[in-house]
Image (cartoon, rainbow, N blue to C red):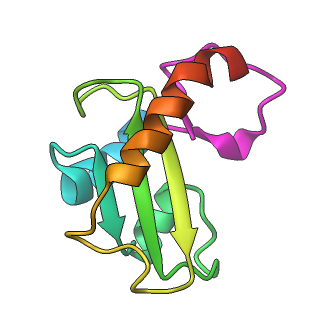
Amino acid sequence: MLFRNAWPKNETIPEQYWIDRKAFELIRLERLSLRQFYLGDLSNKEKHLMFLPEEFPIGSVAICLLGAKTSHKPTALLLFTSRDTARFHNGQDTTFLKHIVDIVELHLGRWV
């Protein structure tokens, strides 16, 4: 998901791939704090803020902040979901996610 104020509007990118930074700020403060990754569950309200249907069968998520070496001004989110409530959880190793984030960050500017 791309933050609206971080990228020029591109009509070829579907609306569901854009997210408002102010809407996400509630999730960032509650779930991520100063971290780059959040692994765990989301409330229905949080799903709604991220434009995920409440009825979407999400048991757990991995949210990765992209594009900023600090968690205060990310340019995008990489979101993984699972129906399994135990798939992503607090305390889980994020080494593989860090590798994926590095790859996506290298190419994101060219893709957008």
Foreground of the two, 26 or 65:
65
Q: Is 99 placed above or below 68 here?
A: below
Location of residue 9 in the rendering, given as x and y in whole percent from the top left corner: 68, 18
Chief SS of the magenta region = loop
Which residue is at 75% across, 20% downward?
A: 10
Question: Is 14 or 91 nearer to us in this picture?
Answer: 91
Q: Which residue lies furthest to the right in this view?
A: 12
- Coordinates of residue 97 in the picture (x, y in percent): 41, 50
Region of the chain picked out in magenta, as a range? 1-20
Label count reads 0
Residue 43 % position (x, y): 39, 75
Image quadrant occupied by the N terminus: top right
Task: Tell me if residue 54 comes above or below residue 13 in the rendering.
Answer: below
Query: Where on the picture, by quarter, is residue 71?
Result: top left
Residue 59 picture location, percent across and down: 48, 82
Report the residue that reaches farthest toward the left. Answer: 34
Q: Residue at the spot x=60%, y=24% of the render?
A: 108
Relative placement, left or right, of 33 versus 87 is left
Quadrant (top left/top right/bottom left/bottom right) for the C terminus: top right
- Is residue 3 among what the camera can see? no
Residue at x-position 22% and y-position 27%? 70
Looking at the image, residue 15 sits to the left or right of residue 8; the answer is right
Is residue 19 within the magenta segment?
A: yes
